[in-house]
Image: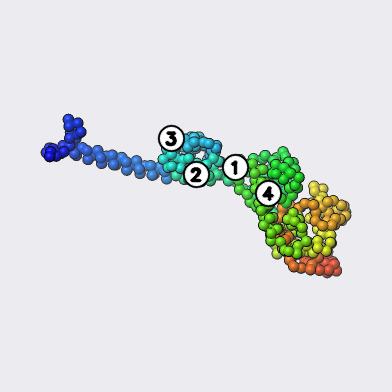
Amino acid sequence: MRSSVNYHGRLPCPCQRCFFSLTTVRRLLVLLLLIAVAAGVGAAWWLHAPLPQRAGSAPAGQPLELEIEPGTTPRGVARAAVQAGLDTNADLLYWWFRLSGKGRGIKAGNYEIPAGTSPRALLQKLVRGEEALRAVTLVEGWTFRQVRQAVARAEQLRPDTASQSDEAIMAALGRAGVAPEGRFFPDTYTYAKGSSDLGLLRRALHAMDRRLEATWAQRDARTPLKSADQALILASIVEKETGRAEDRAQIAGVFTNRLRTGMLLQTDPTVIYGLGEKFDGNLRRRDLTTDTPFNTYTRAGLPPTPIAMPGKASLLAAVQPADTRALYFVARGDGSSHFSESLDEHNRAVNKYQRKQ
């Protein structure tokens, strides 16, 4: 059999008409290998290297803002990234998205791209849907008016409810005819830039629904409260009356005892709430005797609605009050309260802590 290599060290081509030097072939193979290695090293370096930002595309030290609309293709995302200010080739970015196998997993949303972000980190952020988030905090004890003010001030939260009445907002949330006071759980809520304020309120509403349901399930069997809504109302009063966390259950115990025995609650925060914008910071004797639906000095039982947003601790105190015989309490002036079982003891405490006698 004739060898495929002749004695002159030449390799015949398939057509048997021309020959390549074995040395030449080896050199070509080595060159191709070096090119492949160089390309691989270059690609690996590019994937981990910071993507530069185009001059003037964002204030110094600030991230680029990238908005991806629903339905945008990977190629469209690459172009949007370059238009947002990334100083790179859009086609190169697109091929990275495609070859990674994750390009179709990119999620729509509003993103912030910090300086120094690499192509690999960019794709991870977009696939995970790590949108640029903002936050707004709803504080325990706030009224719904204060909630609306905080939502209106929230950065880059779309003000869909700005021109709506409280009643219209509750109707839009599926609670037509329900008073908004106390119906939103106080917490810190994050949101994507451009989100609707109505969506944030809906989350807070559902959070209170869940919290109230769970708390009502833990109620003391001896409670005089008839419903979860009554627990919410009492919890709002406890929230406004409490200066120190350790007093919550005791204060709830006082109001529970009064409800059980038919005594008037006589709590100033309900009177103040009933005065609304008329309250100037000074509660007068005539305010205590002027009847409103929220005046617990003139009307028995709980007021018709909550007077503020209660937190988790106040909700729990309302349904699990301290086992106490106290019927009165007065502020000591340091945030704590003095509790009394009799009116005489209470009057002495008032003289001591309020009148300094």
Comparing labels 1 and 4, the label whose residue is closer to the camera: 4
Q: Residue at x 67, y 43 (%)?
A: 198
Which residue corresponds to mark 4?
205
Comparing labels 2 and 1, the label whose residue is closer to the camera: 2
Instruction: Check the picture and name the quadrant holding the C terminus.
Output: bottom right
Which residue corresponds to mark 2?
127
Which residue corresponds to mark 3?
91
Quadrant location of residue 119?
A: top left
Instruction: Check the picture and name the quadrant holding the N terminus.
Output: top left
Comparing labels 4 and 3, the label whose residue is closer to the camera: 4
Q: CA distance from mark 4 to mark 2?
A: 30 Å
Q: CA distance from mark 1 to mark 4?
A: 20 Å
Q: Which of the two discs, 4 and 3, labels the residue nearer the N terminus? A: 3
Q: Residue at x 87, y 52 (%)?
A: 290
Which residue corresponds to mark 1?
193
Q: Residue at x 55, y 37 (%)?
A: 69
Q: Which of the two discs, 1 and 3, labels the residue nearer the N terminus? A: 3
